[in-house]
Amino acid sequence: MLVVLRSALLLFATAHALFALGQHLPDPDSILIGDRPRPKVLLVGTFHFEYYDLDAHVTDKDKRVNVKDPARQKEMEELVDYIARFKPTAIAVESAPNTGYLMERYRTYQRTDTLARADEMDQIGFRVMERFGLDTIYGVDAPTLVGDLYDGPDSLLWRPILDSIYTDWDFTSDDPVSKRYKSFYTFSDDYHTDHTLLESFKYHNAEKMQDRDYGAYLAGDFTLGKYRGADGLAMHWYSRNLRIFRNVQELPLAPADRLLVLFGAGHMGVLRHLFDCTVEFELVKFGEL
């Protein structure tokens, strides 16, 4: 009995010591960040209001949200009011760096007070620009590594290798996990039709939702071969998001700036992790505005 008691006391003392050590671990941010001011970043993941049908999941026609409907336009104002709590000083969107075509549309909006397109860059981006007097919109989208290699100057060398990696890669997998995701996407479409835009955006931008959204890429084609699927994902989707982050790094931001990043929700699982890990920016959570 005495041996058992001594063992229990030793175990308790060890656990207490480990807990105390954990309570006093040095904070790396005391060195890496300190009291340095950093640009704040708000990531806003959206579904594509124009339904371009370029993603693996295509929403049924009868489940598409018409954001130009008068009732939805009132919801849009509520959504923009919520985003405006962030008080952005700059905005970056899912566009190539040349945003001249967007600025032309924005100037038309300023002249006519009419948003002709349903696109989220117009419906959300232009409203934010006007409200805060922003004079430009930054395009930070990027091509993929596989695309550059496939169409680049050495494509004759790379194409056979890339073709061998992407053989059977069709984004229409029917493995058990992918089937679950198909059901999940149908549920998400129903959620959009049954809830307000702000409710849908809070749903899309919840951290667990973003993590599970990215989890779809880790099934289906990802399991092709031993590493073929992993290599394909790295050169395609992960590469694109790393490049998007790199484009944000190159924006002319001051420490006091507040950058709104408006992108398709599928990007947020990777982008949030990158902005969480960097010491260059301070990430503001959508659900905590």
Image (cartoon, rainbow, N blue to C red):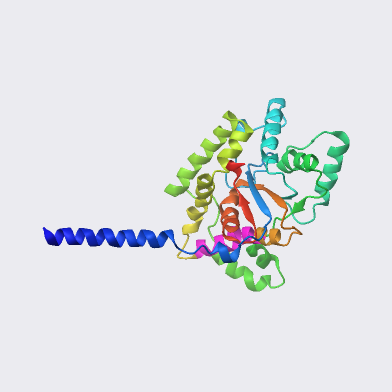
Is 103 situated left or right of 25 in this image?
right
The magenta segment: 228-243
Q: Quadrant of the N terminus?
A: bottom left
**Looking at the picture, how far across and down is residue 51, in whole percent?**
66, 40
Q: Answer above or below: position of 77 versus 13.
A: above
Residue drawn 74% across the image and 38% down it: 123
**Looking at the picture, how far across and down is residue 139, in whole percent?**
74, 53
Is 174 situated left or right of 65 in this image?
left
Q: Quadrant of the C terminus?
A: top right
Residue drawn 78% across the image and 50% down it: 137
Residue drawn 66% across the image and 42% down it: 48
Tally the numbered discs: 0
Per the image, is 254 magenta? no
Residue 46 is drawn in which quadrant?
top right
Residue drawn 72% across the image and 40% down it: 124
Residue 66 is drawn in which quadrant?
top right
Per the image, is 236 magenta? yes
State the residue in front, 211 or 41: 41
Q: Residue furthest top?
A: 71
Is 6 situated left or right of 174 in this image?
left
Q: Residue furthest right?
A: 111
The prevailing secondary structure element of the residues shown in magenta is helix
